[in-house]
Amino acid sequence: YCPIINIDKLWTLVPQETRDQLNKDKAPVIDCVRAGFYKVLGKGSLPKQPVIVKAKFFSRGAEEKIKSVGGACVLVP
């Protein structure tokens, strides 16, 4: 059993007030495991804002799309 989330839904894990406070120079950290998702899949697209995504697993497509907007993928145990 491995709950999944697509990259087009990643920003729903960031509270609205946090999104409003973000500036373009700072990349928010999205912890998918804390939200109950273990694997990030590559369906959809991300805004041009860089993000740091923490998860147990990433699909190849998700990793490429996150890195293409300047973000990073962090594997957590």
Image (cartoon, rainbow, N blue to C red):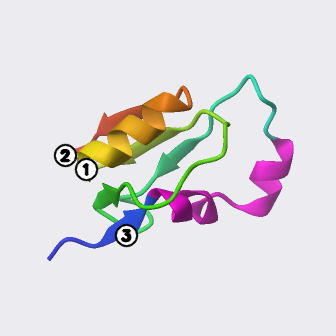
Q: Which residue is mark 2?
A: 77
Q: CA distance from mark 3 to mark 2?
A: 14 Å
**Does the segment drawn in magenta span residue 9?**
yes
Residue 70 lies left or right of residue 6; in this view the side is: right
Residue 47 lies left or right of residue 33; in this view the side is: right
Query: Split into 4 quadrants, where in the image is the N terminus?
Result: bottom left
Q: Which amino acid type is shown beneath numbered disc 2?
A: Pro
Q: Position of residue 44 (x, y in %)?
A: 50, 60
Q: Which amino acid type is shown beneath numbered disc 3?
A: Gly
Residue under the image location 61 percent in, 57 percent down: 11
What segment is highlighted magenta in the picture? Answer: 7-21
First in sequence, mark 1 or 2: give its number: 1
CB under 8 Å between discs 1 and 2: no
First in sequence, mark 1 or 3: give its number: 3
Q: Which residue is mark 1?
A: 59
Q: Position of residue 56 (x, y in %)?
A: 24, 51
Q: Quadrant of residue 73?
A: top left
- Residues packed near mark 3 inside 10 Å, few (<14), some (14 to 19) or many (20 plus): few
Query: Foreground: 5 or 65?
Result: 65
**Residue positioned most to the top:** 25
Q: Is residue 8 above or below residue 24?
A: below
At mark 1, the secondary structure is loop
Q: Which residue is mark 3?
A: 36
Q: Nearer the viewer, mark 1 or mark 3?
A: 1
